[in-house]
Image (cartoon, rainbow, N blue to C red):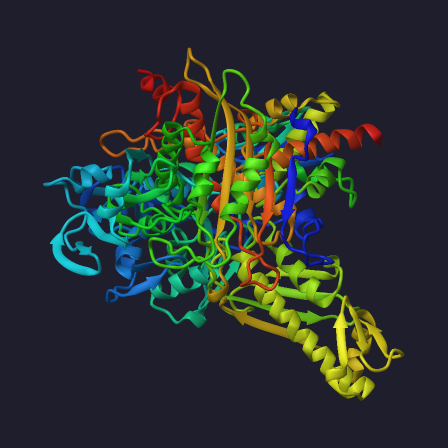
Amino acid sequence: MTTADYERNKVLSSSDEHYRVVGTRPVRHDGADKVTGRALYGADFDAAGLLHGKILRSPHAHAKIISIDTSRAEKLEGVKAVVTAIDFPKSDKMVVGTGDEATTLEWLRDNIMASTKVLYKGHALAGVAAVNPHIAEQAVELIEVDYDVLPPVLTTQEAMAEGASLLHDSLTTEELGHDTGKVSNVAEHIQHVKGDIDKGFEEAVEIFEREFNTKTVHQGYIEPHNGTALWGPDGRLHVWCSTQGAFVVRDSLADLLGIPISKVRVIPMEIGGGFGGKIPVYVEPVAALLSKKTGSPVKIVMSRKDTFEGSGPTPGSNLKIKIGVTKDGTITAAKAWMAMEAGAYPGSPVGAAAMCVFAAYDIENALIDGYDVVVNKPKTQAYRAPGAPNAAFGTEQVMDEIAEKLGIDPIELRLKNVAKEGTRRVDGPVFKRIGCKEVLEAMRDHPHYQTPAPENQGRGIAIGFWFNIALDSACNIAVNSDGTINLTEGSTDIGGSRTSIAMQAAEVLGIPVEDVSPSVVDTDTIGFTAVTGGSRTTYATGWAAYKAAEDVKKQIIARVADVIWGIDAANIKMEDGLITSKTDSELKMTFKEFASQMGDTGGGISGQASVKPEEGIGGSFCGNIVDLKVDPETGKTSISRFTCVQDAGKAIHPDYVEGQMQGGSVQGIGWALNEEYFMSEDGTMDNSSLLDYRMPTALDLPMIDTVIVEVPNPGHPFGVRGVGEANIVPPLAAIANAISAATGNRMTDMPMNSGSIMASDS
Amino acid sequence: MPGKTYVQTTINGEPVDFLCEPRQSLLECLRDIVGLTGTKEGCNDGNCGACTVEMDGRIVTSCLVLGVEAEGASIETIEGVADGSNLHPIQAAFLENAALQCGICTPGFIVASKSLLENNPNPSEHDIRFWLANNLCRCTGYDKIVRAVQDAAKRMQEA
């Protein structure tokens, strides 16, 4: 069978629900603006009297700051203000949320502008505002800093070694929830235990164990970080920026600058990719301080080098995975030891990795240890299912070895141990309805898997999990007199979510999605909405839209009952955009007819909802089948065929679900084969450009075939699970397994580039 | 501060003149002086393609062209691709094939794809991937972009 012989993008639904709007593929509402260049992103913002800011960054990975002299910079013609860490108000150490994690205010502030020490090359030290960006850049070079340079630690192995150079004098290890008082680079040790691990390994007939290493990688969004601030004479701070969470920016600014939340208004501009990296603030607080000093709006846009060196990549990691099985492949015990780089301040995704590392399997006896370790690299941030790809790189390769050694088909081995409804995950939660089995079965039955790998090619498979999150979302809907609606919400739209949210409101009201005008609005205009992240937007903000639409519907029925028809509301139903009486077939009215009478029958109607649907979260599983060829002369890997299968619960807009699957797959391919922070010994990232940090181009890839599996999430009105992240989890391991099949060599270290493949050939 | 140079160009068919410093890139001139912000900056060193424009019939990364080099040149940017309120078939194909997610790379891809189809009206999948290899997209994995360009080629041939 050739690839043209089957449908390349399939939806396999196990739901018999019928929808009018949900599941269709309309053109997105913001589409025309984005194909004509009219959409305004953060860097496109302009204002009268705009000044431009630049940031001085540390040339050392680890050093004490002796002194900073900004006087020469301040004297340069065209320079309007210079700020350093001393311009931030000091306040007591407290914990603040930055969207997906908690940190201390001191660390948050120090990451934005170093006060006593620089902890990575690229760490910000000072900000300059000038009449144009070139003068600001010149001025930055005139700032003189005296350093006492210290040795850096760049990996978890170095940082955890006895006698390692310490990043923080005040950082003590928290051991299983208790502060040990021991100063070290290990911020935290977490542990999950299930069953009896010793007994489990005793029952095993074969035990497989390997150690794995992964490197620091970047989210690689094409739009660099940016922000413009105007601190008005009335004490109100306005910020225009590209962010995954306008409310995170607002609350962080209030905390960092010591002002009330109500004094900060964040206007989210269009955002050019984030993948988790645009959750925290970097340049916004600096622009705010520069604006306060000058009275003018100040814009700061990072360069690409700044973005690599001064934002938040995802960690390198060191893992040891051990799995014991019986002869028939049943897992009797599993053990994971994982150390992850937090970067300069505590907060690696090792906790999330621990939730995901064995999540695909029903395992009786297991032990998971996780270590959060600070190193002299930028503070890591979320990157699409943070921690989970690293973990799956280990687990799924060990599973592959088990299948090979026992002579069991790798998908059958996984199905034998598959996690299902009722399975208790090692970290505690019991799975509700999940689609792990359905994803594996769809992989097994796919024409790709049913056809043998082409000659001289290796095939690999892997599966991965992401738990997804809910958090807060708000939505307002106003009914217009012509029967269209305006929908406002607070989730910045990175990949078409305005439309997937609007579709859910349209479904409830029974109107075409083209009659909905969705807008992402500023923090003064909508209720608190958490970040666009954690695969939560279509799930939680979609839920808010559903509830706001239900609110509208309820008000319409009440109005029709009380004012228009004068009958009992219980006898009125509104379905598919038609309002009817259950008792009198003569009484009917379309949504549009109602809207035209709305003004004269009591006035405008608007619905509102704020939700936090934590109970309904449904995790997503994703699997890959990959065929590839390795050039025996050069070690270059060419992927010839790639299939991604993911449980979406319910795909609201299948085009954009497929887009998430394809995009996540390709980020995983880049991570697997090429991407890394290539660090010199002194802690310099030697490849901080898009030439040398080699992300996949169109020419490096085949088409990415998709199967959307729909195992509806019972916790969401339409069954949505959230699909943004699970798709980056399996590619690393699937590719490693395919390389192993092609070359006979097991790849334990990332990236699996030509050099490492040739070196592995023993 | 260095002195400014007077530059006369044609942008999207209209005569446009501006004053710029010799150190300012064409990208910076388009965005900050002329006010055409549809052309995006992703790297400022020619590696991402977000700033792709057509200059005298060839596509260039405008971050690697100096503003003063645009003297006498004819430049086409994303703002000139649609015919008034009628989308170009490539723009329509990008929308209908969901070939964008965040949209920051989209102007560069559309300008580059237009140049491809003007040079090669019936490209193979490989031709499309080869031509667009200078444009990075981090959201889509390129699948739907390739499909959109294939669809646009068909639309333009049928037109």
The answer to whether any part of residue A61 appears in the image is: no
The picture places residue A124, in percent across and down from the top left corner, at: 31, 46
User: As drawn, which residue projects farthest toward the right?
Assistant: A586
Q: Report the front residue among A581 and A637.
A: A581
The picture places residue A165, in percent across and down from the top left corner, at: 14, 41
Q: Quadrant of the C terminus of chain A?
A: top left
Q: How many marks?
A: 0
Q: What residue lies at 34% left-to-right and 37% top-to-bottom?
A: A394
User: As drawn, which residue projects farthest toward the top?
Assistant: A633
Q: Using residue A660 as the reference point, say whether residue A107 is left or right of it.
A: left
The picture places residue A459, in percent across and down from the top left corner, at: 49, 26
The picture places residue A701, in percent across and down from the top left corner, at: 55, 27
Q: Report the front residue among A60 and B25.
A: A60
Q: Using residue A525 as the reference point, say whether residue A381 is left or right of it.
A: left
Q: Using residue A453 as the reference point, say whether residue A235 is left or right of it.
A: left
Q: What residue lies at 48% left-to-right and 36% top-to-bottom?
A: A411
Question: Within the image, what quadrant is residue B114 found in?
Answer: top right
Q: Report the front residue among A675 and A762.
A: A762
The answer to whether any part of residue A695 appears in the image is: yes
